[in-house]
Image (tube, grey):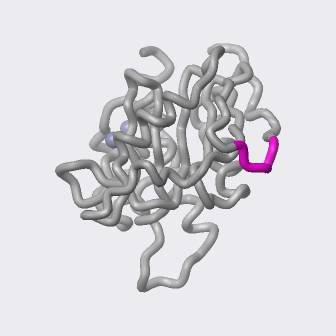
Amino acid sequence: MSPPRPRSTQAVPRAPARSAAVSGDGAELLVLALGAVPDDLVAAVADGLSAVYDLRTSIAPRSDRPAFAFNPARGQYHATAILRHIGSLLSSPAPPAVLALTHVDLFLPDVAFVFGAADPAARTAVVSAARLVRPDVAPDRGRLLRRVLKVAVHEAGHLLGLAHCDDGGCAMRQSRDVGEVDAKRPELCATCRGAYASP
Ligand SMILES: [Zn+2]
Ligand SMILES: [Zn+2]
């Protein structure tokens, strides 16, 4: 057992800080909003990740919608371009890992869409709420928050060295649609918890 570590720190300036360098300020995981992501959702994800991974999170000043990553032919945003951009925002001392939250629809070249993406080598990840709201169902804030947290736990898991898991209820299970996101929990199964505790 490691000694208990502090939970997430208090956030932070709400005013936009456009293209400002982002400093980790001692956090082990920095959560960064890109565009119009509600503050309460950002805070809930930071708290949730802090609890699941037992690490200190903090919230960076909000950054702009990632317009640079927009692909007009697809009408979507290139996840890899966003991951690269996040890396360029980091100042020294940089936090060990950064997870961005956005509302824009993400894609990778050979995939129709992704809920999120991570680059463990660069220690950056991005999570989108765009596909977690179903057009046929009235938005439910609590449900959306839970879905975003599940995807965030998944992508943060990749940042922290976890691979995909076959356990249907584990956050590290791959999800191809909202139903599969709903089927899992915003936490790790015992096997993944063990892998995280002793990498
Ligand atoms: Zn994955
Ligand atoms: Zn698992």
What residue is shown at x 80% (from left), y 40% (from top)? Answer: 12
Q: Main secondary structure of the magenta part?
A: loop
What residue is shown at x 39% (from left), y 26% (from top)? Answer: 120
- Where is 98 relative to 61, above or below? above
Task: Find out whether residue 15 is within the magenta segment.
Answer: yes
Estimate the x, y position of residue 80 in percent, counting from the top left.
34, 40
What residue is shown at x 59% (from left), y 51% (from top)? Answer: 64
Q: Give the camera-side residue of 179 and 191.
A: 179
Question: Which quarter shows the C terminus?
Answer: top left
Quadrant of the displayed image that contains ligand 2: top left
- Where is 97 relative to 130, above or below? above
| Total marks placed | 0
Estimate the x, y position of residue 104 in percent, counting from the top left.
46, 60
Question: Which quarter shows the N terminus?
Answer: top right
| Magenta span of residues | 13-17
What residue is shown at x 67% (from left), y 35% (from top)? Answer: 20
Residue 167 found in image quarter: top left
Left/right placement of residue 126 relative to residue 33 reads left
Estimate the x, y position of residue 115 in percent, counting from the top left.
39, 54
Q: Give the camera-side residue of 172 and 84.
A: 84
Residue 2 found in image quarter: top right
